[in-house]
């Protein structure tokens, strides 16, 4: 990865006719580097990266990082297994890059809400996570804001209400769904524009339960922040805790014992299996096939119970720590997991055989909810959703962490991009994860499960592959406490894909399209 980063920095500097001097490059504690640009260099550099097929995977703001300006914007780009971070120091205003990188739109709106940064030329300047009830000039991620009870607006003027896109035409009518839903799910609003039953436009609105996760982490000790990371999204507890600890470990130069990495990897793959089993069951429920759905629901519940036996938590919380693991998992318990894995594999195959030989299921899944492969780069769509549309991105292979360089997962890919492809990809990944866990159990070494090391100041970026896709974590430690914790789950980017996936489909197919993507509300609204 380092070579690609160096090449990216050199290419940008050569394009700008600027020297890559030490004061322009700030080395992080990982293998990534941060190239600091001047105002007049920023737009040409971004255009150059777009022309060379870089993907914007994150954009976030940090206050007080630089002496040159009040805020520093970190633009994280990826290409060919390399990460390049452009740092743009700004005070209150900068140029939007959303017309060049569409994935920047939500990122820019998030920075505007959180820090008050204005993006000139942005095609969407509406609020994102600050709904109408929040007061004007309220930017909760600024250092000057202290967590406290907030007085919100009691009444909202109609002119201040969120303006959804207006779609007009003969026979067009709107179907609003949510934010409160019939099931026990989190709130989200879906505004359909429909002619007859055919959907030709969908606009989504999230962020009804903003929790202030990133603000809550400020001033916390890195050890205390692990519990916050686990709460980002319940069924990604292991992935987000691992990403956070990985960043801190890179900052501090902490080497993880080999046994700890084997156990961490087993937990990561178990989490993937639990998530995908729930997705398979959910898709089958939404096409009224309870015979298949019940089998996968039972397997998921048994998998949760096995997680509880292994770690003391169904969601495997409270065991991952900086430097390794809080506690070891005894050999007898691991042997029980091996027996369970072998039985689970057989039962999964039986369930999949029933589902994939049922023509009514295939009829509902095939050609439904297609996500074109052309959207993957512009929107930074990742995970099984992307790999079902021909995408290649898998952090475990592109940026191997832990022992994934030694135990390389299969890169499952299909091209059709429909619900059937997403079902098939997730089913294949379950089987691959079962094989990987069995191999890890066979090879797991004895030894320590935690390194004794002091956490140090610094900053680093980490990427992990959650069940939903690419999760990103940035940690900045200053004076022994968290100065900035930024997390971006795969759902934050993948949500935008659903607006395209439903076009040309009928409203009754929306639930199965939605379930096939399994997007997290909590993991988006931090």
Image (cartoon, rainbow, N blue to C red):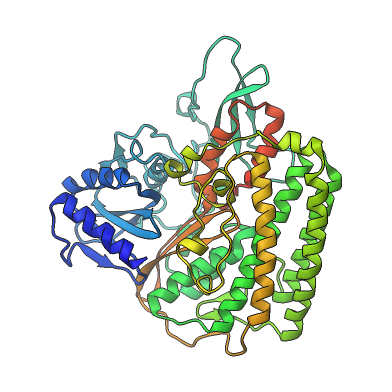
Instruction: Work out whether 376 lies above or below 252.
Output: above
- Residue 140 rendering spot, x and y as whole percentages: 42, 51
In the displayed structure image, the side of residue 244 where residue 136 appears, left or right: left
Query: Which one is nearer the viewer's eye here, 168 or 99?
Result: 99
Front residue of 399/160: it is 399
Which percent across, then down, holds residue 278? Answer: 72, 53
Residue 386: x %, y % from top left = 54, 47
Toward which corner of the image does residue 181 lie, by quadrant?
A: top right
Q: Residue at x 66, y 64 (%)?
A: 433
How many numbered marks have been drawn onto this rendered protein structure? 0
Q: Considering the image in quadrants, where does the N terminus appear?
A: bottom left
Picture residue at 71% right of the left edge, 85% below the top: 330
Relative to 390, is 52 on the left or the right? left
Q: Is residue 316 left or right of residue 298?
A: left
Residue at the farthest top position: 170
Residue located at (23% from left, 43% from top): 43
């Amino acid at each position: 990865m380092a070579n690609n980063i160096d090449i990216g920095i050199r290419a940008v500097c050569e394009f700008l006719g600027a020297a890559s001097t030490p004061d322009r490059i700030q080395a992080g504690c990982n293998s990534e580097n941060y190239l600091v640009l001047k105002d007049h260099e920023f737009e040409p550099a971004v255009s150059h990266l777009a022309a060379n097929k870089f993907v914007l995977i994150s954009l976030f703001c940090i206050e007080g990082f630089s002496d040159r300006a009040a805020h520093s914007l970190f633009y994280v780009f990826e290409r060919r297994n390399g990460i390049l971070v452009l740092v743009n120091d700004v005070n209150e205003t900068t140029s939007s890059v959303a017309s060049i990188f569409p994935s920047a739109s939500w990122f820019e709106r998030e920075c505007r809400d959180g820090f008050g940064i204005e993006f000139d030329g942005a095609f969407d300047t509406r609020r994102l996570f600050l709904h109408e009830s929040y007061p004007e000039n309220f930017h909760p991620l600024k250092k000057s804001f202290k967590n406290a009870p907030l007085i919100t607006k009691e009444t909202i003027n109609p002119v201040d209400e969120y303006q959804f896109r207006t779609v007009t035409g003969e026979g067009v009518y709107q179907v609003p769904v949510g934010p409160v839903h019939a099931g026990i799910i989190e709130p989200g609003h879906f505004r359909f524009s429909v002619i007859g039953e055919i959907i030709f436009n969908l606009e989504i609105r999230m962020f009804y339960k903003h929790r202030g996760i990133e603000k809550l982490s400020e001033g916390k000790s890195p050890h205390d922040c692990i519990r916050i990371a686990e709460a980002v999204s319940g069924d990604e507890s292991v992935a987000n805790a691992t990403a956070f600890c990985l960043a801190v470990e890179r900052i501090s130069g902490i080497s993880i014992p080999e046994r700890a990495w084997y156990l961490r990897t087993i937990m990561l793959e178990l989490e993937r299996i639990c998530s995908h089993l729930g997705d398979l069951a959910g898709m089958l429920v939404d096409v009224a096939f309870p015979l298949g759905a019940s089998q996968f629901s039972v397997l998921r519940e048994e998998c949760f119970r096995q997680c509880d036996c292994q770690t003391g938590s169904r969601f495997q919380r409270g065991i991952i720590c900086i430097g390794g693991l809080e506690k070891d998992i005894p050999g007898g318990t691991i042997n029980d997991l091996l027996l369970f894995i072998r039985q689970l594999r057989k039962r999964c195959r039986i369930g999949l055989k029933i589902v994939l030989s049922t023509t009514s299921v295939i009829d509902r899944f095939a050609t439904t909810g297609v996500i074109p492969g052309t959207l993957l780069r512009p929107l930074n769509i990742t995970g099984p959703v992307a790999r079902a549309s021909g995408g290649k991105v898998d952090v475990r292979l592109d940026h191997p962490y832990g022992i994934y360089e030694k135990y390389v997962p299969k890169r499952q890919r299909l091209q059709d991009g429909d619900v059937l492809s997403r079902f098939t990809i997730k089913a294949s990944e379950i089987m691959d994860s079962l094989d990987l866990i069995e191999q890890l159990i066979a090879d797991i070494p004895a030894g320590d499960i935690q390194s004794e090391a002091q956490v140090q100041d610094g900053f680093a970026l980490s990427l992990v592959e959650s069940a939903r896709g690419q999760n990103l974590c940035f940690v900045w430690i200053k004076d022994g406490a968290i100065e900035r914790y930024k997390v971006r789950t795969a759902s934050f980017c993948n949500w935008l894909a659903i607006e395209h996936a439903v076009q040309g489909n009928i409203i009754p197919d929306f639930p199965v399209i939605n379930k096939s993507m399994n997007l997290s509300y909590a993991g988006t609204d931090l």
